Image (cartoon, helix red, strand yellow):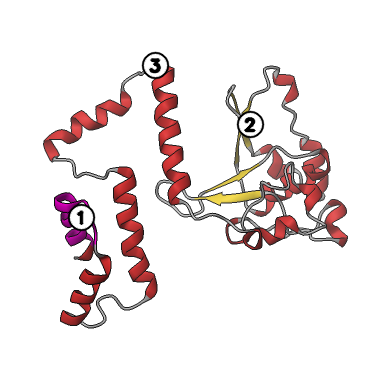
Amino acid sequence: LSLDANLELMKKTGQIDVFEYAKTMVNSRPHLVDSVDQYQFIYDCLAEAVLCNVEPIAMWQLKERSSMYKAKRDRQLMEAQDAYENKLLMMLTPTLRIGDCAGGHRLENRGKNRDVMVVPPDHARPYLQTLHGESKDKDYTYINAVEVDGFTRKNEFIVTEWPKHSTIDSFWTLVFDHSCHTIVNLSNQGNSRAIVYEVGGAAGVMGSDPDWVRKIFVKIFFSGNVK
């Protein structure tokens, strides 16, 4: 109710008044806005509506709108659209603090990152469970990776950086511990021989049963924009 009222007010006056509408609702219906999180949620939704220019689409316009995304557009237009969407995502995504990524900044884990300023938040990273390599005497649970939601399931995918020579065993431990049956490799290497998966080393990491390695499907995509 508060969202709808503020959106209507914004259309008419260009302003919003979250506090006044929330107070009116609480006076009429106690506990309707019952926590700070709910109050903040109203602000977040309004901010997203303003920044993203959210407008309802009529049913008769839906087919025309969906066909727009299927049309082949020139590369510059696509890159401009991607840049705009990425800018919105950056504005709407809360900034991570160093404390949120404490695992990646620990002294024993810094060498496992390609860039010490690009590390995963602890609440979203997959933890390794199997002892492996030199990590047996250190923090064997860490790898620079994050869990990503899919279209229908939460934490459906795992995204990680290209392993360093010293973290190859951690990469295969991640594949094993989290039952990853498909690996999609995004690479800007023009020479396919540069893409090397040390399957023999993976079998060594996991012990005497290498059969699981043979069941992994690997797909490599080459792109000039991968960093």
Which residue appears at 39% of the width and 16% of the height?
A: 74
With respect to residue 96, does 52 lie above or below? above
Q: Nearer the viewer, residue 88 or 138?
A: 88
Residue 135 disc label: none
Relative to 66, 108 lies left or right: right
In space, the residues marked 3 and 1 are separated at their CA atoms by: 35 Å
- The numbered mark, 1 or 2, whose residue comes first in the sequence reads 1
The local secondary structure at tag 2 comes to loop
In the rendered image, which residue does mark 2 sit on?
Answer: 227
- The numbered mark, 3 or 1, whose residue comes first in the sequence reads 1
Relative to 52, 26 lies left or right: left
In the rendered image, which residue does mark 1 sit on?
Answer: 7
Q: Does residue 38 belong to the magenta stretch?
A: no
The local secondary structure at tag 1 comes to helix
Q: Nearer the viewer, residue 85 or 156?
A: 85
Which residue appears at 23% of the width and 55% of the height?
A: 15
With respect to residue 127, does 52 lie above or below? above
Could you tell me the amino acid type at mark 1?
Leu
Give the image location of residue 48, x and y in percent: 34, 51
Q: Which residues are magenta?
A: 3-16
In space, the residues marked 2 and 3 are separated at their CA atoms by: 22 Å
Magenta part mainly helix, strand or loop? helix
- The numbered mark, 2 or 3, whose residue comes first in the sequence reads 3
Could you tell me the amino acid type at mark 3?
Asp
Residue found farthest to the left: 60
Residue 74 disc label: 3
Q: Tell me the crowding category of disc 2: few under 14, some 14 to 19, or many 20 or more residues within 10 angstroms, Cα based.
A: few
Relative to 105, 166 lies left or right: right
Give the image location of residue 157, x and y in percent: 54, 47
